[in-house]
């Protein structure tokens, strides 16, 4: 038995190309990742908006910590690694360039905030 849990999951999911359950779960995880991305962008945008209503010092401190305590990243988790392998050839949608550009825009206050 291999000590790498990612390999073990891959072996157990040897039907990945035709297994409807695995594909459905990956599609669900993909939707959940999209939800997490939207929520993170809203959180960052709201923090930036809030920082404009605080004292200069407090606002600056909030902007410095604007990315703290967001959703944890799951790189290294065997199920998440399998999802990334099946859906994105190993790429992590939480680290994709287009998402990071949106994060940067939200940090600068240039993201739609629905408040």
Image: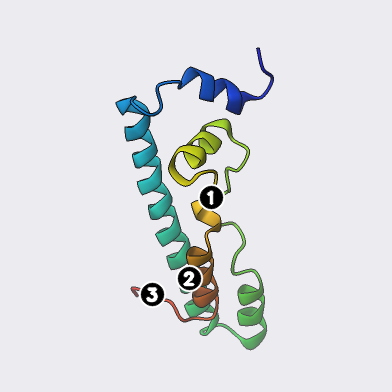
For residue 62, what is the image quadrant? bottom right
Q: Which residue is mark 3?
A: 113
Label 3: few (<14), some (14–19) or many (≥20) C-alpha neighbours in 10 Å: some
Residue beneath the point at 54% across and 49% down = 91
The answer for how far apart the CA atoms under marks 2 and 3 are is 12 Å
- 71 lies above or below 81: below
Q: Say which residue label 2 marks.
A: 102
Instruction: Check whether the beta carbons of the residues at disc 1 and disc 3 lie within 8 A of each other.
Output: no
Q: Earlier in the sequence, mark 1 or mark 3?
A: 1
Q: Earlier in the sequence, mark 2 or mark 3?
A: 2
Seen in the picture, residue 31 relative to 56 is either above or below; the reply is above
Report, in whole angstroms, how far the alpha carbon at label 1 lies from the one at label 2.
16 Å
| Residue on which disc 1 sits | 92
The quadrant in which residue 15 appears is top left
SS class of the residue under badge 3?
loop
The location of residue 78, given as percent across then percent down, is 57, 31
Q: Residue at x 38, y 75 (%)?
A: 113
């Amino acid at each position: 038995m291999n000590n790498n849990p990612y390999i073990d999951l891959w072996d157990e999911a040897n039907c990945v190309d035709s297994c409807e359950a695995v594909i459905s779960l990956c599609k669900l995880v993909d939707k959940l990742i999209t939800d997490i991305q939207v929520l993170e962008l809203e959180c960052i945008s709201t923090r930036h908006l809030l920082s404009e209503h605080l004292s200069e010092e407090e606002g600056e401190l909030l902007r410095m910590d604007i990315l703290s305590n967001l959703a944890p990243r799951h790189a290294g988790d065997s199920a998440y690694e399998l999802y990334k392998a099946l859906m994105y050839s190993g790429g992590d949608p939480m680290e994709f360039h287009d998402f990071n550009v949106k994060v940067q825009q939200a940090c600068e206050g240039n993201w739609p905030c629905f408040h």
